[in-house]
Image (cartoon, rainbow, N blue to C red):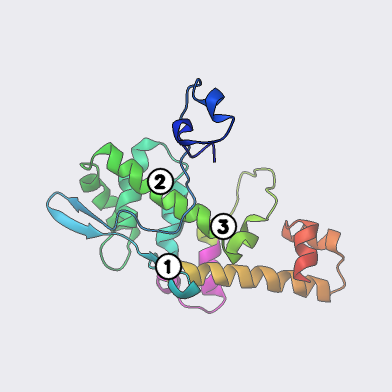
Amino acid sequence: MCLHTDPFRLQLPIARKLRTMNYRYALDLCFCAQLIPKVTVQGHEHAGYTVNTAYGSLTCSLTALQYIEARALLAANGDALPLLAAILYFPGSYNSERAHALAAAFASLPHALLAAIALNFQALNTYLFTRTEFVLLTQFVEKPARPITTDAADALYDLSADGLGDATAVEQINVITYLRILRKKTIEAVRTLHGMDYDAAKISTETGLPIGTIKEIV
């Protein structure tokens, strides 16, 4: 409460001490809402992605590739904000190359608006992996960096090898569907290894999941 409330509005005993200190608001970047549904870029209106949690069901209009590319830019510096916005507000069927070209136009938006778009998406990303069943996908233990590694985009194209369509088709899979598939594949992999009489420790070594999580799955 103290982190998110001005001390002059608190009725707690500690508030008197807090009022003498330099107070800074802490942003609550974990929510499932689209607070900037539209932006106007050089006279053209662009509608952003939509999210909805009505009736206890989560939906999001982002495609898998759109989400993966946007998420990768969250760790980038401020120079990448126009590209992030162009990805999240891309009109029609998503295309990486065209989104990159559109970023030049989005660079004309005020920096504060671009930063707000990034914070809104960051809050959604945090919500997906802390308040939903997709928290399982964050349980993997990070391994030491290697010269050649795979990333989230590679996992997306693996779905094509699984028979879910060609590369273009899997790029357009809805992000919620994509995350559900990854979650299902993770659970199936653990249960398959368990069926092969692997113990929890060995399954943990093979999958990178903590032993506690593995025990919950099997």
Q: Which residue is labeled 3 in the image?
A: 129
* SS of the residue under disc 3: helix
Give the left or right position of residue 39, taking residue 186 as reference.
Answer: left
| Magenta-colored span | 155-172
Q: Which residue is labeled 2 in the image?
A: 119
Q: Is residue 157 above or below residue 98?
A: below
Nearer-the-camera pick, 102 or 26: 26
Nearer-the-camera pick, 161 or 8: 8
Amino acid type at circle 3 is: Phe
> Which circle's residue, 2 or 3, is located before the other in the chain?
2
Checking the image for residue 21, the label placed there is none
Amino acid type at circle 2 is: Leu
* SS of the residue under disc 1: helix
Q: Residue furthest top?
A: 20
Q: Residues within 10 Å of mark 3 (few under 14, many from 20)?
A: some
Q: Residues within 10 Å of mark 2 (few under 14, many from 20)?
A: some
Q: Is residue 181 above or below residue 79?
A: below
- Residue 76 position, x and y percent, is 44, 40
- Residue 150 position, x and y percent, is 58, 55
